[in-house]
């Protein structure tokens, strides 16, 4: 089924004519992405990444994954931001794929978290995937120090070397040097792909293959998306429709976009999306604030604000057409809760009615919304979704006149932290 975009609940906010009127600016943004003539054009490697990933690399990573799973009980990935979120998003969306345990480190500096992790790893055979494009980011660098010491106490020589995989820049950075000096395996992150666009580079592919995810399927979905969303005509391109609607809604004072889903496996995809959109668009004093909610859970905590609070929000739902499990609601002879009305129906049927009702109620309450529906919760659809959002944010950033591919604001806290730490 692929991916569809339903804009029915934008009525009264986005007119077809307004969307069509965006075409000349969209055409320019499209051309800038295609011809690499826009801002940040050194970082457009992601646009043709799916079609340029060699199948031989995917085969190699699949084989690497088999080896890792044969000699390890678990994988620890070290990384933050773009070197972390896509991995977690994929594994959680795919509900752990093959069930191989994956732990995360270096995405925070909590001593309790990392001490507990070391405790968990004590009696396990471990493989580490250390991921940092710059190779100098504080959080993963410190976690790697700690885990490297842990690994060196457990293993030595060739055994240690085969258990540490570094994913980093091809030439520069401390991680590249550490890998070279210690003989660790390395995979290269292309120069022209920024962190938040890197899930389909070895950043995501190495740990996902190690965990048993079908990376061929993931990339196949992204390749299809690369082809489908390369159409300049907004009327024929749902990805550009999404980007265009966001722009029109922002201009009407809808400054917050909530990515909402009735599917719990979307939690970390939402986090990945927040980085992609927040870091790409939040600059020069502008940008839609990306927020996320998981329903029904959050309807019982945030539902009031959505329905009735300040009208500065729009929503994008991500739905799944066919879920993996059938779960029939039982008939109850007593029927005290009066839910025999849905006895015999699938739980997902009720979930979907909940979504339709919520979307309609929110639209009536002044929260315009769109729905992206994926055919299934599998690797192929996830690859498609990743590319859909990447292309949408590239276009959206160009429509709003910012460079969507840099992140100068992220440096401010680092400078102050380094000053406090006395780091030059
Ligand atoms: O989008 C970005 O560039 C950042 O969020 C980075 O992904 C994050 O800071 C991690 O950087 P690195 O991979 O260089 O350690």
Image (cartoon, rainbow, N blue to C red):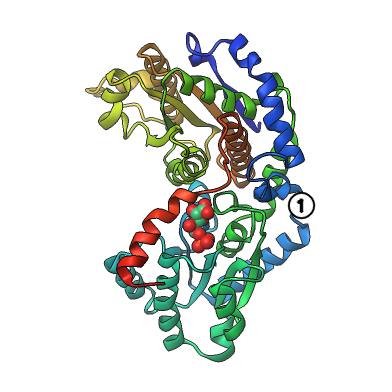
* The one of 70 and 103 positioned closer to us in this rendering: 103
* The one of 295 and 78 positioned closer to us in this rendering: 78
* The one of 417 and 359 positioned closer to us in this rendering: 417
Q: Horizontal and vertical percent for residue 286?
A: 45, 33
Farthest left residue in view? 336
Q: Is residue 258 visible?
A: yes
* Image quadrant assignment for residue 59: bottom right
Query: Does 180 appear above or below 59?
Result: below
Q: Residue at x 35, y 18 (%)?
A: 341
Query: Does 195 appear above or below 16?
Result: below
Identify residue for label 1: 52
Is the N terminus in the top left, top right, bottom left or bottom right quadrant? top right
Query: Does 279 appear above or below 338?
Result: below
Q: Element type at marker 1?
A: helix
Q: Is residue 345 visible?
A: no
* Image quadrant assignment for residue 7: top right
Q: Residue at x 31, y 65 (%)?
A: 113
* The one of 249 and 165 positioned closer to us in this rendering: 249
Q: Horizontal and vertical percent for residue 140?
A: 44, 67
Q: Horizontal and vertical percent for residue 394?
A: 61, 38
Answer with left or right where residue 54 lies relative to residue 189. Answer: right
Q: Residues within 10 Å of mark 1 (few under 14, many from 20)?
A: few
Q: Horizontal and vertical percent for residue 337?
A: 24, 23
Answer with left or right where residue 279 lies relative to residue 334. Answer: right
Q: Is mark 1 within 8 Å of ligand 1?
A: no
Q: How many marks?
A: 1
* Image quadrant assignment for residue 411: bottom left
Is the C terminus in the top left, top right, bottom left or bottom right quadrant? bottom left
């Amino acid at each position: 089924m692929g991916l569809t975009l339903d804009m029915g609940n934008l009525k009264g906010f986005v007119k077809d004519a307004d969307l069509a009127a965006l075409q000349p600016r969209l055409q320019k943004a499209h051309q800038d992405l295609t011809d690499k003539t826009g801002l940040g054009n050194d970082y457009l490697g992601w646009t043709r990444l799916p079609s340029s990933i060699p199948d031989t690399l995917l085969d190699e990573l699949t084989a690497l994954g088999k080896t890792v799973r044969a000699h390890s009980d678990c994988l620890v990935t070290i990384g933050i931001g773009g070197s972390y979120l896509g991995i977690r998003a994929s594994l959680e969306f795919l509900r752990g794929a093959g069930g191989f345990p994956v732990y995360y480190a270096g995405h925070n500096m909590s001593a309790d978290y990392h001490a507990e992790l070391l405790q968990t790893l004590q009696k396990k055979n471990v493989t580490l995937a250390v991921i940092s494009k710059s190779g100098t980011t504080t959080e993963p660098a410190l976690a790697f120090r700690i885990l490297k010491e842990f690994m060196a106490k457990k293993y030595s020589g060739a055994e240690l070397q085969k258990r540490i995989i570094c994913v980093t820049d091809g030439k520069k950075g401390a991680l590249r040097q550490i890998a070279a000096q210690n003989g660790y395996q390395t995979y290269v992150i292309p120069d022209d792909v920024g962190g938040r666009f890197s899930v389909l580079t070895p950043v995501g592919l190495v740990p996902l293959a190690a965990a048993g995810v079908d990376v061929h399927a993931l990339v196949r979905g992204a390749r299809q998306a690369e082809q489908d969303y390369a159409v300049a005509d907004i009327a024929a391109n749902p990805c550009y429709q999404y980007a265009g609607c966001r722009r029109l809604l922002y201009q009407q004072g809808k400054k917050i976009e909530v990515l909402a889903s009735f599917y719990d496996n979307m939690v970390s995809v939402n986090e990945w999306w927040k980085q992609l959109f927040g870091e790409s668009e939040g600059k020069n004093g502008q940008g839609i604030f990306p927020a996320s909610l998981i329903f029904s859970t959050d309807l019982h905590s945030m539902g009031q604000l959505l329905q009735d609070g300040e009208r500065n929000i729009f929503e994008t739902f991500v739905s799944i057409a066919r879920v993996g499990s059938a779960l029939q609601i039982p008939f109850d002879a007593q029927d005290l809760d009066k839910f025999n009305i849905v006895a015999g129906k699938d739980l997902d049927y009720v979930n979907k009615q909940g979504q339709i009702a919520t979307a309609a109620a929110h639209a009536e309450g002044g929260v315009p919304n769109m729905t992206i529906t994926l055919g299934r919760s599998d690797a192929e659809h996830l690859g498609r979704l990743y590319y859909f959002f990447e292309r949408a944010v590239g276009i959206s950033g160009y429509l709003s006149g910012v460079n969507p591919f840099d992140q100068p604001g992220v440096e401010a806290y680092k400078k102050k932290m380094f000053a406090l730490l006395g780091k030059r």
